[in-house]
Image (cartoon, rainbow, N blue to C red):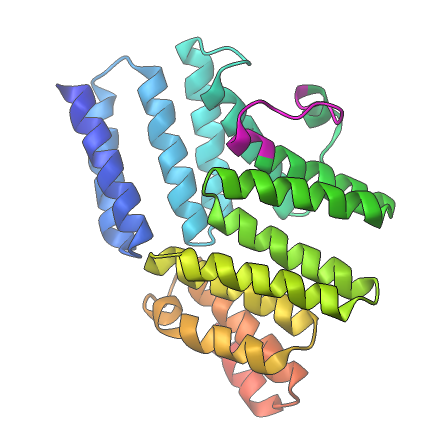
Amino acid sequence: SAAASVRARLAEAWACGLLDQADASRAALDRAEQDAASLADHGLLGDLHLVAAVTARLQLDGAAESARLALAHAAYLRSGEGPAGHRMQLTEAMMARSEALRGGEFDARWQQVFPPDQVPEHRDVAAHVLYCHAARVFASGDYARTMQLYRAAAAAASDCGLRSLQSALCGLMATLAGMQGNPAGAMDYIEMALEVLREAGHVAERATLQIYLAQTLIELKHLDLARQMLDQAQDASLRVAENVRHWTFCGSRAWLERRSENWAASLAWAERG
């Protein structure tokens, strides 16, 4: 059936995204979108946009992720899926987290959807929502509560295999521990992040985690380990010259060289990005 064909294309797009085959992933999504155009299945179209959002996140393309999440949300609304539906909750939680990552706040609108005193039933939804609550509490200066929320979010992310989010949270916990004068605790969280990295079996996922972790290590002044992470991520990150991961990698490398007082190398990487 046409619906089965769309779902097969989505599975192909997801697999290609994990293998860092961005062009093949986009082609599969394009074919899925063409096949879905003839169907009046808004739920399926929402699933398509949700897969596209996740593959954009693998490429560190926050703008594309946000745009696709908005399209998924609109499609699920048209499908009649209510606010209690898992897909709707996941999409809204990812929208809230995407806004937080772009410097926004977990504002009153999202706090009404996800009240601070309630943990969502679905663990993937909970992971994103707890991250957002942690960002809000961090801004208030309550670092002890922030750490509690980070840990809860990391546990939820681990439960449902959200390795990118789990690794990012380990990095945030390491940074927070470092801010509080606890270098041993910071390294414990770095070790947790490295363990998550060892579990990442796909090229795109692994390179993304290595860049995130390198940024945390630079912040904590563990420059040799940061260089090791970026060395390992370099081939996958520079394979395509005009994508967001390429630019993010070059910016991270420039930051590392600047922290290492390698001024010429820092400038070269900044210009390359």
**Left-right relation of 72 to 9:** right
| Residue 111 on image: x %, y % | 72, 25
**Left-right relation of 203 to 93:** left
Determine whether 170 is above or below 82 in the image: below
- Of 17 and 62, the residue lying toward us: 17
Determine whether 207 is above or below 169 in the image: below
- Of 160 and 176, the residue lying toward us: 160
Name the residue at 63% across, 65% down: 216
| Residue 256 on image: x %, y % | 60, 78
Determine whether 104 is above or below 91 in the image: below
Classify residue 48 by image quadrant: top left
Quick one: quadrant of the N terminus?
top left
> Most prominent secondary structure in the magenta stretch?
loop
Determine whether 175 is above or below 113 in the image: below
The residue segment tinted magenta is: 113-126
| Residue 167 on image: x %, y % | 55, 54
Residue 76 at least partly seen: yes
Q: How many marks?
A: 0
Name the residue at 86% across, 45% down: 142
- Of 120 and 94, the residue lying toward us: 120
Q: Is residue 266 magenta?
A: no
Q: Does the magenta stretch include residue 121?
A: yes
Name the residue at 67% across, 24% down: 114
